[in-house]
Image (tube, rainbow, N blue to C red):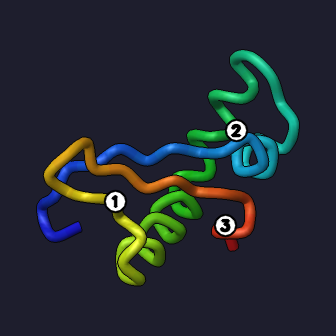
Amino acid sequence: MDGLLFAVEFDSSALIKLSQGQFGEARIAALENQRGRVRAAAQALYDNGFLNDATDDPRLVISALDIV
């Protein structure tokens, strides 16, 4: 997004929603399959100004409510 590197964090509700309750290797595979939804949520948060201070450890935190 505009060439800026930042971390994307998930709260526990987002992890459960994206991984559909899977654990271990199954969770990793489930999360990989949801990259499009993660990108869409991150883009929406970024577009609406929810990126914290970009000069000091920039990050977006995604919750289940952010995932469509």
Q: Is residue 63 above or below residue 57?
A: below
* Left or right of 67 in this view: 1: left
Q: Which mark is residue 52?
A: 1
Residue at (41, 83) in percent of width and height: 48
* Left or right of 23 in this view: 48: left
Q: Looking at the picture, which amino acid does disc 1 mark? A: Asn
Name the quadrant of the C terminus.
bottom right
The local crowd at label 2, few if under 14, some if 14 to 19, many if 20 or more residues have their Cα within 10 Å, is some
Residue 35: image x %, image y %? 52, 52
Please give the residue where the numbered disc 3 appears in the rendered image.
Answer: 67
Disc 3, SS = loop
Between disc 3 and disc 2, whose residue precedes?
A: 2
Residue 33: image x %, image y %? 61, 46
Residue 53: image x %, image y %? 25, 58
* Left or right of 1 in this view: 50: right
Residue at (43, 47) in percent of width and height: 8
Residue 56: image x %, image y %? 20, 45
Q: Looking at the picture, which amino acid does disc 2 mark? A: Ala
Q: CA distance from mark 3 to mark 2?
A: 15 Å
Residue at (28, 50) in percent of width and height: 58
Please give the residue where the numbered disc 2 appears in the rendered image.
Answer: 30
| Marks 3 and 1 in Cβ contact (< 8 Å) | no
Q: CA distance from mark 2 to mark 1?
A: 27 Å
Q: CA distance from mark 3 to mark 1?
A: 19 Å
Disc 1, SS = loop
